[in-house]
Image (cartoon, helix red, strand yellow):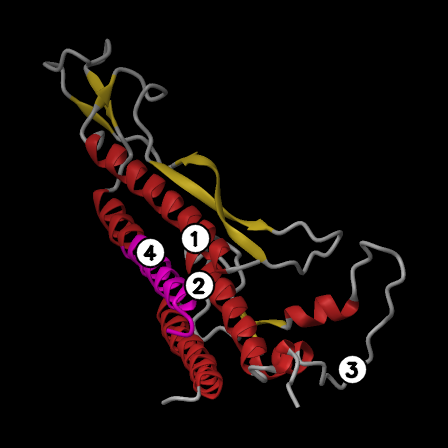
Amino acid sequence: MIPGTDNLFGIHTKALDVWQRRTEVLANNLANADTPGYLARDVDFRKALATASGQSAGLTLETDVPGQITTAGQAAQGLAYRVPTQPSMDGNTVDAQAEQAAFAANGVHYQASLSFITAQIRMLRTAISGQG
Amino acid sequence: MSLFSVFNVAGSGMAAQSTRLNTVASNLANAESVASTPEAAYRAREPLFAAVQKQVGANSDAESEGVRMLGVTESQAAIPSRYEPGNPMADADGNVYASNVNPVDELVNMISASRSYQNNVEVMNTAKQLMVKTLNLGN
């Protein structure tokens, strides 16, 4: 049985999406490191991945009008506000060091997902060509 | 929504921080300038940043995409006056009005802006590397 291309790479494509999204959110935090009143955001990975792979426990509303914003779309954002360790006087909750660490870790996770997909491609190629 | 938007976000951050560096340079250059009236004296300038909100209906919880400059504010600190009758800029009473730039504030601002700029450069570099790796997927 040949699986559809959608689940050829299993959960890794979805994970890649979430890591990519998190890259954007963390980049936003770092860009706004000196913006007064800016609240740092982050992606709840477990929740975002569950939503992306359709395993969310929550109910989703149907959207029958084109262009209607889905609750799933909003939930897929899965954004939460970071709990500040050292909030500053101007209301900014970005801790540049913490964000940098999260960004670096995020990049490694992204590459890990890429490696899984690459391994899958290699395996398929081996199966197709029949030689190692 | 893709890694490309990280370039926009980091780019907006770099633009904002370089404007901040510009105001610091302007303030430090004018730290010793004098004027004949308190109104004409140089006042320290500082940029005001704000997050750019993504437009998603009336959702106030929308995430931001980058940072922008709201404008440049002028310091409201008192303008110091000095008695220098020999100065060509002195008024009728022999006073000159100096700028209200605090060099220590400016240096702190400079370091902070420089660090934030470097952070944004790093973000852009990492995003670039991740994109290249994604393009080479399967090799």
* B105 sits left or right of B72 in the view: left
Question: Mark 4–mark 3 contact, CB under 8 Å?
Answer: no
Check if mark 4 and mark 2 are on a common chain: no
- Quick one: label 1, few (<14), some, or many (20+) residues within 10 Å? many
Residue A45 position, x and y percent, is 56, 80
Residue type marked 2:
Ser
Can you say whether A65 is above or below A59 in the image? Answer: above
Mark before the other along the chain sequence, 2 or 3: 3
Q: CA distance from mark 1 to mark 2?
A: 27 Å
Residue A9 position, x and y percent, is 55, 82
Q: Report whether residue B138 is seen.
A: yes
Residue type marked 1:
Phe
Q: CA distance from mark 2 to mark 3?
A: 35 Å
Q: Which residues are magenta?
A: B115-139
> Of the numbered discs in the image, which one, if any, rests on residue B116?
4
Residue B134 lies in magenta, yes or no? yes
- Quick one: label 4, few (<14), some, or many (20+) residues within 10 Å? many
Residue B117 position, x and y percent, is 31, 52
Q: Which residue is mark 2?
A: A88
What secondary structure is marked by label 3?
loop
For the N terminus of chain B, the image quarter is bottom right
